Amino acid sequence: MNISRAAELSGVSAKMIRHYESAGLIPAAGRTDAGYRVYAMDDVHRLAFIRRARAVGFGSDDIRQLQPLNRISSLVA
C-alpha cells in the first residue's frame, strides 16, 4: 500500500512516517519502480504502536527499546 493509505490506517501522518523511517524507528520501506514507498500491514501495526507509545509520553529511544515487545505480543495474539 502507498504512504497515504498507511497513514490513514495507522493514524500517523505521511510526514511522520517519513520521519520515523529516517530516524530508524521503522525499517526502510520498499520502493516501486517509480520510487514510491510501499508498506505492508506489519508496517501499519508498527506505526500504530509508535503512535500509541508517543501518546503516552515515550520518546524515540524508549520506543526503540519497546519495539521487540510489540513484535512478541503480535506473535502471541
Image (cartoon, helix red, strand yellow):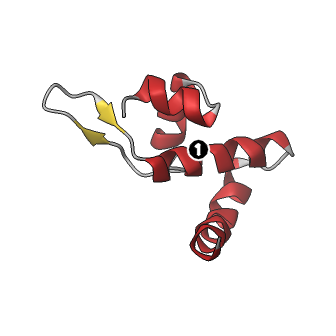
1 sits left or right of 59 in the view: left
Image quarter (top left, top right, bottom left or bottom right) of the C terminus: bottom right
Residue closest to the eye, 8 or 35: 8
Classify 10 Å Cα crowding around label 1: few (below 14), some (14-19), many (20 and above).
many
Residue 26 location (% of width, % of height): 49, 50
Q: How many marks?
A: 1
Residue drawn at x 73%, y 58% is 62
Residue 13 location (% of width, % of height): 59, 25
Task: Tell which residue pokes out farthest to the right in this image.
Answer: 56
Note whether 64 is above or below 32 in the view shown.
Answer: below
Residue 52: image quadrant is top right
Which amino acid, mark 1? Leu
Task: Tell which residue pokes out farthest to the left in this image.
Answer: 33
Task: Tell which residue pokes out farthest to the front in this image.
Answer: 77
Residue closest to the eye, 1 or 54: 1
Residue drawn at x 42%, y 52% is 27
Note whether 43 is above or below 9 in the view shown.
Answer: below
- Secondary element type, mark 1: helix
| Residue wearing tag 1 | 47
Residue drawn at x 67%, y 50% is 49
Image quarter (top left, top right, bottom left or bottom right) of the N terminus: top left
46 sits left or right of 6 in the view: right
Residue 3 location (% of width, % of height): 42, 28
Residue 42 location (% of width, % of height): 48, 53
